Amino acid sequence: MSYLVLARKWRPRKFSDMIGQAHVIRALCNALDSNRLHHAYLFTGTRGVGKTTIARLFAKSVNCEQGIGSQPCGTCSACREIDEGRFVDLIEVDAASRARVDETRDLMDNVQYAPARGRYKVYLIDEVHMFSNHSFNALLKTLEEPPPHVKFLLATTDPKKLPITVLSRCLQFNLSRIPATEIEAQLQRILDAEGIGYDLASVRAIAKAADGSDRDALSLLDQAISYSGGTLTGEQVVTMLGSIRVEDVHALIEALAADEARPLIDRARRLAEYQPDYAGVLGELLSTLQRIAVCQVLGAAAAEEVEDDPVVRQLAGKISPQDCQLYYQIGLLGLRDLPFAPDPRVGFEMTLLRMLAFRPVTQFPSAGGTPGAKQPQATSPPANGSQSAAGKISVAKAAPVASAVPKTAPVPAPATTLATTAIEPTAEHWPALIEKMGLTGLVRELAKRCAWTSFGAGELCLAVDPQFVYSKATETRLADALRAQLGASVRVQFRISAEAAPDTPIARDAAERRERLRQAEQALEQDEVVRALQADFGASIEEVTVK
Ligand SMILES: [Zn+2]
């Protein structure tokens, strides 16, 4: 199995297959479906985040023989030729390759001619900031009076180098790095579908190394598959990538938690045998501490919020939140000072020893595990079905400030009794209904991105978050699941919400998390150890680390 095989096989064929870039795709799909197409789009962003893929999908959407729209058929000859990379009216230009300077001149001259095969000639000009002045002038002339049969997709990693005259004539989109969690999920889907075994550590390591690029992730995945010759393990992947094993970092934190110098030094020495990049090791240590801190603050809810890593959860129960913050602060300083150490290994060991030495003497309850874990999340509706609690943020107890949280009203039992009571479900029952349906994957995601608009006269109306991209098949599956709960004859209507941020369960969860984060920050500010640190070391709370 070669890289080309996997990358080609899993290249998105539909907009709904793409991971990341939901805002861009939503905007493009809307434009395609309402046939309000701009003649020039500019995509900015780093490499490997989907520019070429978007261009191909766009070319299919405007040239599909079945008509213009965001869901090209994929089977007509235009669609197939584009998928196979041999469509004459999709012209891809890499402005960075010098050999093409003369070609770009010819290219701009050719823009005037009608497309040979399709409705539109689609030009994808990558790294457009590398154009020569002559090419820019030709491009500008075309953009000022665009022929009706031409669409330009310009892409650049450096938009500052583009003439303002070009910039002002393009609709600009910023393509962001794809979050590691989305890449992880994508890798797991591929491995599952290919029937290749793997452990969580292996996909996590690949997703991390891919650094926001779907293309790099696929390429690394292919390398890992041929490297492992079968089942992927975290250890193999880490060796392949030349990075540090997460287990080694976990062991260091374990030794810190046990407050014992001997195992800590032993661990550090064993690590030294691999001659690792110590800045990388410290970085990994810091990011693990961050995950532990998130786990401690969010408790059970951390499963979906961070990564569902049992070892991190265990560690979160072994060290106190104060120690975790302290280790992070010391680690950060250690990383900053590493270049000044006589040699990196010395700097690294001193940082670890400082973590031990400055550990505040506080008792942390070993029984009971993570503070905040398994706290009930009061999202249930009021029993009388009134609107009183609608839209209010319900507060889960965050450990240190639990007693300070005012309770608004007695919280009734979760609405798991939906089917046993004869009441008509309302918007209030929506989160509970989602849980009850036992949905998974994209269908669950779609449900959580829907706001309940109305239910009555055999019709349920849902408003979908306009940022969310999903397929018709997902919609159908959700409608089926809803009918199974509400009655076989119920019609389920999905509408794209006119509001930018509809009141969906996901939006409510996010509001709830923000509230908990606020409380955690407050708790930290009031914390004695943190205060002492601030006084003695000039330490400051870094807001980004409080999650
Ligand atoms: Zn087609």
Image: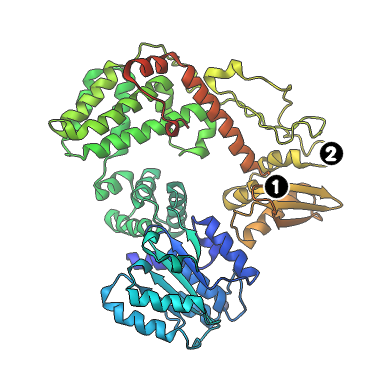
Where residue 204 sits: x, y (%)?
A: 38, 45
Q: Are marks 2 and 1 in contact (CB under 8 Å)?
A: no
Mark 1 CB lies closer than 8 A to ligand 1: no
Q: Position of residue 118 (x, y in %)?
A: 53, 84
Say the numbered circle drawn on residue 332. none
As rendered, which of 399 and 465 lies closer to the eye?
465
Distance between the Cα atoms at labels 2 and 1? Answer: 20 Å
Q: Which residue is mark 1?
A: 451
Judging by the rendered image, the residue that carries numbered circle 2 is 423
- The answer to whether residue 332 is above or below residue 365 is below
Which residue is pictured at 79% across the width and 35% down the height? 387
Q: Is mark 2 within 8 Å of ligand 1?
A: no
Mark nearer the viewer, 2 or 1: 1
Mark earlier in primary sequence (2, 1): 2
Badge 2 crowding class, 10 Å Cα cut-off, few under 14, some 14 to 19, many 20 or more, is few
The answer to whether residue 85 shows anywhere in this view is no
Q: Is residue 462 above or below residue 48?
A: above
